[in-house]
Amino acid sequence: MNRGLFIEKPKSVILRDAGDPLLLEHQVRVQVEYASIKHGTEFTVFSGTSPFHGRRFDGKSRLFVEKEPDEPEFDSGIYVGNTIVGVVIETGTAVTEVKQGERVYGYHPAFERVVLAEQALHPLTPPLSAEEAVCIDPATVAYAALRDARVCLGDNVIVFGLGAIGLFLVQMLRLAGCANILAVDPKEKRCLLARKYGATHIFDPTRIDVAVESRHVLGDGADIAIEASGNYKALHQSMRSVRKCARIVALGYYHGKDTELELGAEWFHNRLELICSMPHWGNPMRDYPLWDERRLVETVRQMFIEKRLVTDGILDPVVDFEDFSRAFMDIYQNPASAIKLGIRF
């Protein structure tokens, strides 16, 4: 058996055998020790409200189009998990760089064993830890948003959503020398971490009007808002929380139909700039060719190695693989109980 957590239909997951594929000459088999999931993306797909529900993304036109009648409405066959860390237990005949017994990491759903091309794996060598390796992906998304926001020394920035991406953003904004970092989330556990990472002010949007309070703190709205929750209401509030002609960067994976955005209000009257930050899916960096995805990832990896970015408290909870299904459902039903789910094998 080689199990993974499988989304069989909306709001239903099971541990299911994924099989053990034959090893091709340029591939490597890895016994997984540690893994993590991508909360925003995977819970959006799991909810059945993602843009892919009933539609597909046409790579040529880069449009979402209606599915053909013979295509399933829901994309079943989706395994949960984003990044794995493990030990190489078998190599193909043409593999030259990776050796048996080496610890490696790479992108893959959270299986007990995975097969990946040699080029898709990276060595896990000290001082980079397993916990840091599975956090490279959310930190890369955060760093792309930071660059899209064109943050400068002394800026006042407000961050909506303090999941893993938002918490790495807080750390990066501190490193960038922001004068004030306002962090917004209704979950106390996340707010406490944001304060530890350098946020100067913490706001619970269920208790206060964030836009009004940010003006009390700053004397005006923020220079930049970064919306990292994927919540339409938070995106609207980010538009209310910035000053005239300010910049809003949205990186969340929005789902469902919008019922919160009011584009005729602050967005229109304050002439705000709204930017989507999406460094994947074939999208180039805005400052390409000076920066590309490879350079983005390598820069983030180096920040972890130098301990300028830390993961303390972000991987929460960490559960045994046998508890993966229960933990996934618990977090879906009670998001306040977690920040980023880690899985031990």
Image: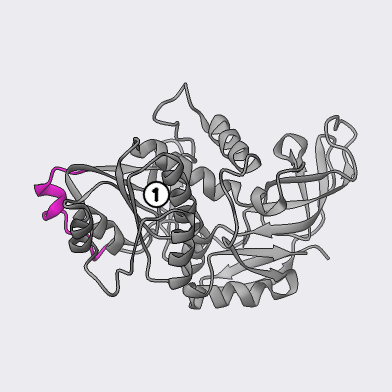
Give the magenta part as a residue range.
Answer: 258-272
Placement of the C terminus among the 4 image quadrants: bottom right
The picture places residue 11, in percent across and down from the top left corner, at 52, 74
How many marks the image carries: the answer is 1
Q: Nearer the viewer, residue 122 or 65?
A: 122
Q: Is residue 26 visible?
A: yes
Label 1 sits on residue: 251
Horizontal relation, residue 254 to residue 215: left or right: right
155 drawn magenta = no
Horizontal relation, residue 267 to residue 194: left or right: left
Q: Nearer the viewer, residue 287 or 204?
A: 204
Residue at (45% x, 59% y) in the render? 194
Magenta stretch secondary structure, dominant: loop
- Identity of the residue furthest to the left in this view: 269
The picture places residue 181, in percent across and down from the top left corner, at 35, 51
Q: Nearer the viewer, residue 134 or 154?
A: 154
Residue at (40% x, 36% y) in the render? 147
Residue at (76% x, 43% y) in the render? 126
Q: How is the image coloured?
A: one colour
Q: Nearer the viewer, residue 150 or 330?
A: 150
The image quadrant of residue 118 is top right
Above or below 248: residue 335: below
For disc 1, the neighbor class at 10 Å (few under 14, some 14 to 19, many from 20) is many
Q: Amino acid at mark 1?
A: Leu
Horizontal relation, residue 174 to residue 39: left or right: left
